[in-house]
């Protein structure tokens, strides 16, 4: 069994050491449980909810999934400093995979109570934690994106028609006034999405957002967008997808009261991106890179809340990409 000094040392070897100071690391150890697993022991079980986010302190773990007709398949190996269970916890859905200790391992369980405690009393520490989780999620997304584009390249998927390409290229969102969009600020503030913002924060957010009216089949974010950008869906719906060789692999549909962001919010000049295209007429709020930077430098408390939503949007993408990966594994098995 590792003592507190050993755990503190192991934490210093993780991504958190680049973000947390010594006091924040000590608070993390004090407020959370240390869990020990023997090799072969289940940490998270497919089909069950995660009761928090797990941070691996020592050892290695194996991500597995039971696939229809294929039995159990090993998907990934994670080690010290990696987070697990974030999709199940934040999305409040059963785990799509199981996590098994590949060797003797120890994890810190970051509980819901701890995360709420940070939000209330140490929002900057919560921001740092969200940053560490988001960075890891982007690394996973990059690996999965490469895997999925390779599958698309070698598949017989139908390419988009020339008409569809032309339609997308000419369909652009138009900037409108808030009043023209018939958006009720008071109603917005009562929504689940905006209820964490104070009236002043919501007003500040709206002042720095561009209101757009986007027709169906309008590209809002594509692989060519390299600047940090966020959108908040007010009305309508947006389709996420991975496009390669003019072939489209659909991921998910985003509805009202949801923020989505591109990978550039976490990585400078990213090597990949996810496409976001309206699948029906939509009203969206757009926050461009200069305004996001403005929030970060001049409205720290508001920025922490916005970044938490950015983190959650990336985790939602991770969930969708993981589901697609499992579907592709099943399809590849069926082709054998």
Image (cartoon, rainbow, N blue to C red):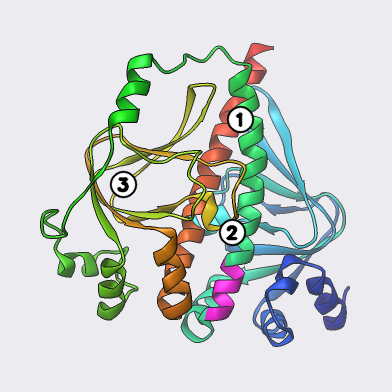
- The CA span between labels 2 and 1 is 20 Å
Where does the magenta region start and end?
Answer: 124-130
What residue do we see at 82% from left, 76% from top?
7
**Res 20 → quadrant:** bottom right
Mark 3 or 2: the one toward you: 2
Q: Is residue 243 visible?
A: yes
The residue where tag 2 is placed is 134
What residue do we see at 83% from left, 71% from top?
10
Label 1 sits on a secondary structure element that is helix
Q: Are marks 2 and 1 in contact (CB under 8 Å)?
A: no
Q: Earlier in the sequence, mark 3 or mark 1?
A: 1
Please say if 18 is above or below 23: above
Q: Is residue 66 magenta?
A: no
Q: Residues within 10 Å of mark 2 (few under 14, many from 20)?
A: many
Residue 15 image point, x, y percent:
73, 66
* Left or right of residue 176, residue 131 in this image: right
Numbered circle sitting on residue 148: 1
Residue 265 image point, x, y percent:
52, 57
- The CA span between labels 3 and 2 is 22 Å
Image quadrant holding the C terminus, namely top right
């Amino acid at each position: 069994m590792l003592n507190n000094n050993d755990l503190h040392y192991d934490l210093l070897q993780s991504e958190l050491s680049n973000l947390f100071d010594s006091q924040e690391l000590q608070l993390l150890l004090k407020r959370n449980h240390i869990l020990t697993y023997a090799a072969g022991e289940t940490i998270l079980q497919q089909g069950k909810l995660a009761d928090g986010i797990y941070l691996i302190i020592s050892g290695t773990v194996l991500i597995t999934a039971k696939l229809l007709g294929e039995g159990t398949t090993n998907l990934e190996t994670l080690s010290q400093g990696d987070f697990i269970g974030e999709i199940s916890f934040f999305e409040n859905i059963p785990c799509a995979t199981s996590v098994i200790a590949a060797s003797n391992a120890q994890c810190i369980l970051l509980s819901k109570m701890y995360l709420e405690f940070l939000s209330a009393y140490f929002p900057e520490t919560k921001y740092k934690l969200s940053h560490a989780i988001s960075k890891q999620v982007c690394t996973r997304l990059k690996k999965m994106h490469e895997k999925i584009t390779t599958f698309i390249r070698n598949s017989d998927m139908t390419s988009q028609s020339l008409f569809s390409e032309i339609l997308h290229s000419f369909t652009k969102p138009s900037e409108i006034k808030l009043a023209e969009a018939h958006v009720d600020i008071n109603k917005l503030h009562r929504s689940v999405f905006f209820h964490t913002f104070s009236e002043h924060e919501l007003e500040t957010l709206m002042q720095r957002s561009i209101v757009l009216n986007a027709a169906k089949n309008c590209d809002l974010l594509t692989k060519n967008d390299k600047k940090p950008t966020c959108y908040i869906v007010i009305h309508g719906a947006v389709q996420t997808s991975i496009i390669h060789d003019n072939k489209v692999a659909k991921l998910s549909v985003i509805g009202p009261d949801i923020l989505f962001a591109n990978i550039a919010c976490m990585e400078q000049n990213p090597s990949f991106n996810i496409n976001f295209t309206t699948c029906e007429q939509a009203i969206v709020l757009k926050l461009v890179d200069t305004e996001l930077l403005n929030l970060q430098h001049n409205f720290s408390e508001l920025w922490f809340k916005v970044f938490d939503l950015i983190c959650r949007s990336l985790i939602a993408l991770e969930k969708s990409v993981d589901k697609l990966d499992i579907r592709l594994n099943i399809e590849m098995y069926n082709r054998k």
